[in-house]
Amino acid sequence: MAEMVVIDRSGKEHRVTGRAGTSIMETLRDSDFDMAAICGGMCSCATCHVYVDQEWTARLPAAQGDELELLRELGSYKPNSRLSCQVTFSDALDGLKLAVAPDE
């Protein structure tokens, strides 16, 4: 099974089994990473904000449209910010490293 490396808000690193075909947000929410995911993946709240490790940003499709607009409104926005509801996990992302962004 493909895994991702998740750094929680306290800085602790975890290896988490990803579920191919589902959003990263679903895995993080279901794994108790204190991710509100209020809109349930509809790209309308930014409560599933993560920072993707620089090594991985180019391997993901770029943020576009509503996602990019929501991200840019956040005080904690960085160039490697993503809404985890907009990234679908696959076996090709085995080893993906990301950090859960601060709650806003």
Image: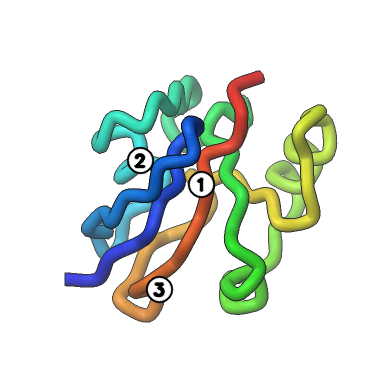
- Chain-order first, disc 1 or disc 3: 1
User: Would you name the residue on which mark 1 appears?
Assistant: 84
Q: Are marks 1 and 2 in contact (CB under 8 Å)?
A: yes
Q: 10 Å neighbourhood of mark 3: few (<14), some, or many (≥20)?
A: some
- Amino acid type at circle 2 is Leu
> Which residue is painted at 47% across and 31% down in the image?
10
Distance from the alpha carbon under mark 1 to that under mark 2: 8 Å
Q: Position of residue 21 (x, y in %)?
A: 30, 62
88 vs 80, left or right, is left
Q: Point out the residue furthest to the left here.
A: 1
To which residue does mark 2 refer?
28
Q: Is residue 62 left or right of residue 52?
A: right
Do the residues under discs 2 and 3 have CB atoms within 8 angstroms?
A: no
In the image, what residue occupies the spot 57% across and 44% down?
Answer: 50
For marks 1 and 2, the one nearer the N-term is 2
Locate residue 36: give its quadrant. Answer: top left
- Pointer 3 residue: 93
Q: Residue at x 66, y 68 (%)?
A: 54
Q: Is residue 13 left or right of residue 20?
A: right
Q: Which numbered disc, 2 or 3, marks the residue that appears first in the sequence?
A: 2
